[in-house]
Image (cartoon, helix red, strand yellow):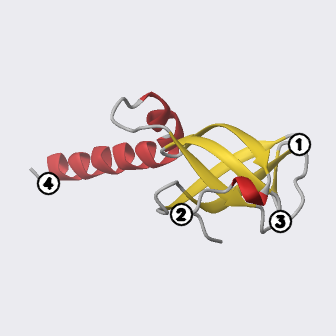
Amino acid sequence: MKKLLIAFVIVCSLLIASFMMFRESLDRFNPFIEQEHVYVEIDNEPTDDDGRYKYSLRGYNVAGDSKRVTFTTSVRLEKGTYLKVWAKGAYTESWESIDEEELPSGVNF
């Protein structure tokens, strides 16, 4: 009985760890998560991701709800640049640079 309990705890731990590690891939194909635009401002330095620049930023959707997005680029983006990120949960599909005037009224940095 004790061995069964230990095995159960190990299996549960592995499942939870795999969901956390592959959250981006799971969100990409999850039909219950809707895609939305998240507006972000580049306010920190990127980290190196095998020759690419990785940004992890806090942004806001049109309703003004705070969201965390992570994405990589092949170019370094300047601080103060505003982006419109097409995101679905933890998965980021694309991004585009926008002017400050294009930010929705519910988005405040």
Residue 2, disc: 4
- Left or right placement of residue 79 versus residue 60 in this view: right
Give the CA separation, mark 3 to mark 2: 18 Å
Q: Secondary structure at mark 3?
A: loop
* In this rendering, the label closer to the viewer, 2 or 4: 2
Q: Which mark is residue 106?
A: 2
Residue at image x 77%, y 62%?
A: 42
Mark 3 sits on what residue? 80
Give the mark nearest the N terminus, 1 or 4. 4
- Dot 1: within a 10 Å radius of its alpha carbon, few (fewer than 14), some, or many (20 or more) residues? few
Seen in the picture, residue 48 relative to 96 is either above or below; the reply is below
Q: Which mark is residue 51?
A: 1
Image coords of residue 47 (percent x, y): 80, 57
Q: CA distance from mark 2 to mark 4?
A: 54 Å
The secondary element bearing badge 4 is classed as helix
Q: Are marks 3 and 1 in contact (CB under 8 Å)?
A: no
> Could you tell whether 41 is left or right of 17 in the image?
right
Callout 3: 10 Å neighbours few (<14), some, many (20+)? Answer: few
Residue drawn at (48%, 43%), measured in percent from left and top? 23
Q: Nearer the viewer, mark 3 or mark 1?
A: 3
Q: Quadrant of the image for the C terminus?
A: bottom right
Q: Position of residue 29 (x, y in %)?
A: 44, 28
What type is the residue that disc 4 sits on? Answer: Lys
Q: Residue furthest left?
A: 1
> Considering only order in the chain, which callout, 1 or 2, is on the residue closer to the N terminus?
1
Mark 4 crowd level (few <14, some 14–19, many ≥20, 10 Å Cα): few
Q: Earlier in the sequence, mark 2 or mark 4?
A: 4
Q: Amino acid at mark 2?
A: Gly
